[in-house]
Image (cartoon, rainbow, N blue to C red):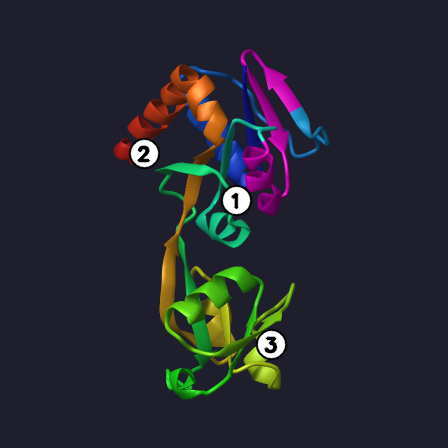
Amino acid sequence: MLTFALSKGRLADKILKMLKELNLCDLTIDDEDRRLILTTGNYTFFLAKPSDVPTFVDNGVADIGVVGKDTILEENRDITEVLDLGFGKCRMCVCAKESDGDSYKYKSNLRVATKYPNIAKSYFDSVHQNCTIIKLNGSVELGPIVGLSDVIVDIVESGRTLKENGLAPVHTITELSARLIVNNASLKTKYDEISQIIKGFESIVKEK
C-alpha cells in the first residue's frame, strides 16, 4: 500500500490521470466530493492544503507527495525530491515598481513583502543584502504601491497582474514547477513500489 499526499484540484487531477495512464489506478475526484481520504486498490490519497503536503511526507503519514517547488523551498522539510513533473511552470521573482527597476539592490535595509518569508530571507541572505521581511497573506502587489515595501517576492506566471499594477519582475530567484517528493524512510522500505511510480512518471514526462 502506498499513500499519496496531494492538494485537491488541478494538481490532484493531473496525478490521478497519470496513474490511470500507467494502468496503476483508475480514480477521479468529483468537484462535489468532500472526502479527504480516498482509497483504491493499493493506493490511498490524502487531499491536503499544498503547504501541508511536505509535512505529511516528512512525518511518514504519506509515502509520496506532489507539490510545487515553491512549497518545498518554503517549508524546508526533511524529504527527498525525486522528479520534476514538468507542469505548473512559473518563477519565483523579486518584483518592483517599473519605474524603480533594480534600484532595490542599493538600499541599505530593503523592505520585502511576500507570502514566502523563508524563500525571500534565504535569497537576500545569499546576496548579502540586509532586508526586513513583511509577511502578507493576500495581494502582495499592494506592498510597493501603498509604500509598505520596496519590493515583493512572489510567484510570476504571465506577469499580467504585476503589469496592471505598475510592477515588473526584476530578478528571477528560481524556476518552479510541480515536483514528486518522497518520505526518506519509505524510499528504503518501499523502494520497489516507489521506483515503479517514479519510472512511470518519468516516461510520461519525457513524452510531453
Provide residue 163's location: percent of width, then percent of height. Answer: 46, 75
- Could you tell me how far apart the alpha carbons at marks 2 and 3 are, in whole angstroms? 37 Å
Marked residue nearer the N-terminal end (2 or 1): 1
Provide residue 43's location: percent of width, then percent of height. Answer: 55, 18
Question: Mark 3, mark 1: which one is toward the viewer?
Answer: 1
Location of mark 1 (residue)? 77
State whether residue 26 appears in this view: yes
Q: In the rendered view, does 38 fall on the left or right side of 75?
A: right
Marked residue nearer the N-terminal end (3 or 1): 1
Location of mark 3 (residue)? 142
Does 105 sit above or below residue 199?
below
Does 142 sit above or below residue 199?
below
Provide residue 83's location: percent of width, then percent of height. Answer: 36, 36
**Looking at the image, do the residues carrying marks 2 and 3 touch, with CB atoms under 8 Å apart?**
no
Looking at the rendered structure, the number of numbered marks drawn on it comes to 3
Provide the secondary structure element on which disc 3 rests.
helix
Which quarter of the picture shows residue 42? top right
Residue 129, disc: none
Viewer-nearest residue: 192 or 36: 192
Write down the region rendered in magenta.
38-59
